[in-house]
Amino acid sequence: MALKVVFRPRAEKDLLDIYAFIAADNSMAAMEFIRRLRQICHALEDMPERGAPREDFAPGVRILVFERRVTIAYRVVKDRVQILRLFYAGRNKPSAFREN
């Protein structure tokens, strides 16, 4: 049975920030990039173990790299895949987790 993908509030903000950054140069490219990013996140419904475990971020966290520009941090909780954060272009991931 497929799991449900849920974007946590901070991940939703990350999506908006990524869109704004790319859209400053090209809004059409930004929309397409966000569409592909959401698509790969929703693909975790069927293969949630696809990402690498990263307990150094937080307990139960896994990461998946998208197009070498975004690191998707997520966790599987019961019947859901929680998208926790979306780190664009090498942002310092462990310290960003401690900010929350």
Image: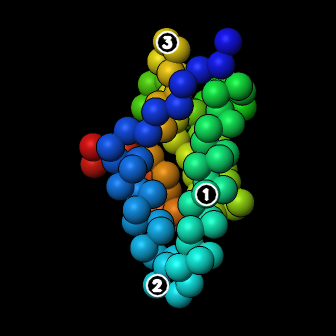
| Quarter of image, res 92 | bottom left
Q: Which residue is mark 3?
A: 78
Q: Is 30 or 99 nearer to us in this picture?
A: 30
- Tell me whether circle 3 and circle 2 mark residues in contact (CB < 8 Å): no
Q: Find numbered disc 1 in the image and state the secondary structure of the residue it sits on.
A: helix
As drawn, 31 above or below 41: below
Q: Earlier in the sequence, mark 1 or mark 3?
A: 1
Q: Which residue is mark 2?
A: 24
Label count reads 3
As drawn, 40 above or below 3: below
Q: Earlier in the sequence, mark 3 or mark 2?
A: 2
The amino acid pointed to by label 1 is Arg
Q: Earlier in the sequence, mark 2 or mark 1?
A: 2
Q: Residues within 10 Å of mark 2 (few under 14, many from 20)?
A: few
Q: Find numbered disc 3 in the image and state the secondary structure of the residue it sits on.
A: loop
Q: Which residue is mark 1?
A: 35
- Please state which of the two labelled residues, at mark 1 or mark 3, is closer to the viewer: 1
- Please state which of the two labelled residues, at mark 2 or mark 1, is closer to the viewer: 1
